[in-house]
Amino acid sequence: MTGSAVFSRIIGTGSYLPESVVTNDELAARLAKQGVETSDDWIVSRTGIRQRHIADDSMHTSDLAARAAQAALDAAGKTAADVDLIIVATSTPDYVFPSTACLVQAKIGNRGAAAFDVQAVCSGFVYALTTADSFIRASRAKCALVIGAEIFSRILDWQDRGTCVLFGDGAGAVVLEGSSEPGIRAAQLHADGSLTGILCVPGNVAHGLVTGDPFLRMDGQAVFKQAVSVLEQSARDTVAEAGLEISDVDWLIPHQANLRILTFLAKKLGGSMDKVVVTLDQHANTSAASVPLALDQACRDGRVKPGHEVLMQGVGGGFTWGSVLARM
């Protein structure tokens, strides 16, 4: 591709979900023992979630990420040695440092690739994918592994019914390679730090002790209102950047937070839920993993086909949001 424009294209997808599946009924029974009241009907009617995968105590975020990464490499027909850039989007890293990306690098058997984490919460995968695309377009990388991986079950307050029923654990990944034809067609990233308080984990570790509040806290109504507004505008702006219309998009893969948000977004964009990939009923909200998990499922079950225009969107704490339009 010397002397010609360099673009990037997704050439493989992969995912991994922990073996333990917890249904709403099972979760309600567990929570009842702690004095927290909920039910399958309550959760489904408000969120659309029916079950979630929960990692056992022996697993780390890098373990989930490495398994998703290997699945994506296998799908792309690549080996770890082919990769020269690894980006992991996560809010639940194994350690303060080194990065989860470096731990994944060791687990898949790669040496020498640039490796770092991106922290944009539920927008993380979209941020990471856009970053990897920029590296490839600038000829700073040829083959990138982009991963979203989370173990959110460990930062939940299991006494808070409003949040603990919403999340699950998992990882998704894509392999992005240089191409003479555009794959990533357009991307837009945004944030508004003045909205930090509506979704955050306001704690840290200092002097060997937990400081602040180490659990996820959310103003659900404020998040819903903000999410539907910014996602609609982001979708329209990103598609316009590529010179297309919303009607040209074959599949919409938004962050899997709440079925009400997905339904409302589809309506505001003038589309049908038939064009929206929905996995939150089976996976719950897996934060940075939700978009690549949904993409992998839709690719493997045949919904997303080569040549399809796929709009991926993230929205999350920060407050962050963004979109990536990709031709598969």
Image (tube, rainbow, N blue to C red):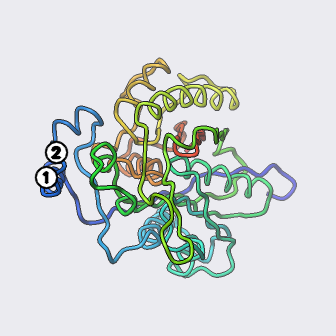
For residue 141, what is the image quadrant?
bottom right
Q: Secondary structure at mark 2?
A: loop
User: Quick one: label 2, few (<14), some, or many (20+) residues within 10 Å?
Assistant: some
Determine contact: label 2, label 1, CB under 8 Å: yes
Where is residue 7? Give x, y as percent: 72, 50
Residue closer to the observer: 51 or 197: 197
List the residue tagged with mark 1: 32
Residue 142 vertical position relative to residue 43 in the rendered view, above or below? below
Residue 41, position in %: x, y? 16, 36
Q: In the picture shown, does residue 90 fall above or below 248? A: below
The first of marks 2 and 1 along the sequence is: 1
- Pointer 2 residue: 37
Residue drawn at x 40%, y 36% as measured from the top left: 220
Total marks shown come to 2
Measuring 66% from the left and 41% from the top, which residue is drawn there? 189
Q: Is residue 325 left or right of residue 140?
A: left
- Taking the spot 63% from the left edge, 63% from the top edge, the residue there is 144
Amino acid type assigned to the residue bearing label 1 in the image: Ala
Q: Is residue 73 left or right of residue 131?
A: left
Q: Quadrant of the N terminus?
A: bottom right
Amino acid type, callout 2: Glu
Q: In this rendered view, identify the residue nearer to me: 146 or 73.
A: 146
Q: Is residue 246 above or below residue 55?
A: above
**Which mark, by number, is residue 91?**
none
Depth check: give the residue in front, 324 or 215. 215
**Which percent across, then down, holds residue 151?**
40, 62
